[in-house]
Amino acid sequence: MTAPTPQDQPQRDHLVSALVRDEPRVLTRITSLFGRRGYNIKSLSVGSTEHPGVSRMTFVVTGDRGVVEQAMRQLEKLHDVVRIIDHSLEKYVDRELVLVKVAITPESRVEVRQIAEDFRARIVDVGRHALTFEVTGDEGKITAFIEQMRPFGILETMRTGRIALTRGSNADIPSHVYHGGETETLRPVVESVEPREERARGVPNLF
Amino acid sequence: MTQGDMTGAKALWATLVGHGITTVFGYPGGAIMPVYDALTFYPEMRHVLARHEQGAIHAAEGWAKATGEIGVCLATSGPGATNLVTGLADAMMDSVPLLAITGNVARHLMGTDAFQEADITGITLPITKHNYVVRDVEELPQVIAEAIRIARSGRPGPVLVDIPKDIQLAPYHGEIARPHARPEAPDPAPEAIARAHELLRGAKKPVIMVGGGALDAAADITALARAWDIPVITTLMGLGVFPASDPLWLGMPGMHGSVAANRAISEADVLLGIGLRFDDRVTGRVNGFAPNAAIIHVELDAAEIGKIVRTHVPVRGDAGAAARLLAEGAQKLELPEWQAQVEEWKSRTAQPDHWGAAYGVQAVVERLRPDDILSSDVGQHQMLAAQLARFEKPRRWLNSGGLGTMGFGFPAAIGAALAEPGVRSVVIAGDGGFQMTAQELATLKMYDIRNVKICIINNSYLGMVRQWQEMFHERRYSEVWLGDSNPDFLKLADAYDVPGYRASSAEELPAAIDAWLSDPKSALLEVVVPHEHAVFPMVPAGAALSEMIESEPPRAPTPGTRKNAAAEEANNA
């Protein structure tokens, strides 16, 4: 009758989205919650959604299942948080964008361009001694692209954080939840939404 | 300004009045002066002027802890606001519904390091349930209404609303916001209740453990425990949820818990926890906590379930609703062996028999009436009071549980005394903690508050730290001796027209207590006790509850080598 202890569980990356009110200091509130409890955010992207007043944050957090579960439950308590989505529990699409500046020589130029073409990377800047590429894709593709370019000499890279959406036609914010930008009514309505299906948890989920 | 001109500041008061708020605690300053000016137009609102913002917020907490209703406090910007920080953290830890209103510099000055400016919403982000800066006067009443709703709903907590000075002064044209309905707590899932029933029916060594989240479910929890005939442990925050006179009561668990409570947890096969968060002072070493028990955890805050201890049956919902469901269909468990074992542990409760801090605390708490409110500060006297007092009702025991805030007890007792003027508000403090908020004696005088009874257990030490130094630092008493610099507490009280009484021996104590309690005014009793007294039982930090030290070990005759010279001299005197 013993549940696994945190030490028994592997550390891995978890992809989590938070739908939050678009108000000052919400980002600080959320990141400071992570920081205080010692969870490192590996990547973070924030942007607007189709609903005025609601922003979407996508985090990658490293930790065991229990740590991430606790982080999500703490987040769910925040007044600014409308909904938390743990993407690892369902099918999702995710993307990242990276800019990579690769050193080139007259000899390597053609080969570099050929590899970039294989990855469908776009050239966004051309210099005498460097090409800058833009690549979008999931984490694996972007990592593979960088690895392919590494032998030529990578001068700089900048990756955005990962962004993700649940697959299928379900929206994470049901359309009936939100009424034309009235943040006042947002939360009570969201709270009346049916609870999400049972999640795989360290403890049996009975609520 | 005439009364007809509605401003942000007046809209604030109108909203508070509309929410049934009758009393606020505060301290004025430059950035909240329009609010204090507007107060003069609302004679139905009582403002209690504390002598320090920390006193104001602890008084608001005392009000809230005694009544279960929201406490409200006010402060100006910058230093006024930062003086609220301790109380906000305290209220956060102990789930106290609290509204803190701070003034701030005018919007055009915010962010410029203006005079008395502090980023109080930034500072208090992690220690409030939510906080706001009001940036538009038309939103002010709605923000206040929402802040009150958030503070009171679900697991209660503190909410801070920061109002720039120009917003306070701005004309207001809108409606005054009405109170939100208090949202209902989710009902516990039937499957969870069914699984809990199953475990309880099969239990051979069950215990129920209740915390501060169950304060308003006392009747339901009492009925539940009696229906199943299961012994009950009440945490420091839950004292009074179950009547101490009931034979099923086992006392308090944890670091200074009772033998019966800690042994029962260590032996239990089913532990039903209701409205508690398994604080480390309660659990001791977590992997030694209730090692044989299946744990059922009833809790409103989902984030608390599984946070510290493994939980076999999580039950999310209101404590009272869950207790009623769990009591349905209950049959008394016939467990004579378990009952006999529990009785044997209970018999190990020692009553203090020689003069000392425990003797003094015992003498005071045994004179309490069931309606009396007992506040404590933080330290040895707090643990002694928690061990020795016998609470029959909830919300009669106010102390700083989670944060362990010295200076809490006295102002909290003032808040409770104002909330319930008909009852005695007794505070047990130490000589250390009392001096952190002793200036609130002026508040007693100013409002002629007559039902606060202050007892200072004076051992001339920061007693709990000294106890740890004695036990874990080879009696190197570092910076804990107060004796030479303590004031004459009776003279201090006299300076504020508060009558004072003193007892320095067991013989003097009864008469002193009588005089102190029968004084028609608020009064102070100083109980002078021997310097070295330790609180037992004790579970050392990092140990399991089963490793409890039940009573004081024989004291080593040689003093420590690097003992504070002043303390040594005093001890040898």
Image (cartoon, grey):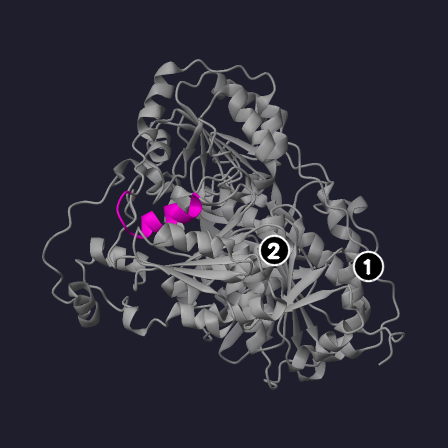
Name which of mark 2 and mark 1 comes first in the sequence.
Answer: 2
Is residue B150 in view?
yes
The vertical placement of B239 against B24, above or below, is above
Q: Quadrant of the C terminus of chain B?
A: bottom left
Secondary structure of the residue carrying tag 1 is loop
- Residue B63 tag number: 2
Location of mark 1 (residue): B177
For residue B22: magenta?
no
> How far apart are labels 2 and 1 at the CA level?
24 Å
Q: Amino acid at mark 1?
A: Ala
Neighbor class of circle 2 (other Cα within 10 Å; few <14, some 14-19, many 20+) is many
Indicate yes or no whether the magenta region holds residue B362. yes
Image quadrant occupied by the N terminus of chain B:
bottom right
Q: Main secondary structure of the magenta part?
A: helix
- Left or right, B414 with respect to B546, comes to right
Looking at the image, residue A184 lies above or below residue B138: above
Mark 2: secondary structure: helix
Q: In the image, which residues are magenta?
A: B353-366
Q: Crowdedness of circle 1 by 10 Å Cα count: few (<14), some, many (20+)? A: many
Q: Residue at x 75, y 80 (%)?
A: B166
Of residue B188 and residue B75, the one placed in the foreground of this image is B75
Location of residue B130 by image quarter: bottom right
For this view, does B107 lie left or right of residue B493?
right
Chain at numbered mark 1: B
Q: Position of residue B463 (x, y in %)?
A: 31, 58
Tell me where residue B330 appears, x and y as whole percent. 56, 17
State the image coordinates of residue B72 (x, y, percent, origin top left): 65, 61
Residue placed most toward the observer, B333 or A130:
B333
| Residue at far left of view | B558
Tell me the residue at 67%/53% (across/down).
Answer: B150
Q: Position of residue B375 (x, y in %)?
A: 49, 53
Residue B440 in the image: above or below residue A178: below
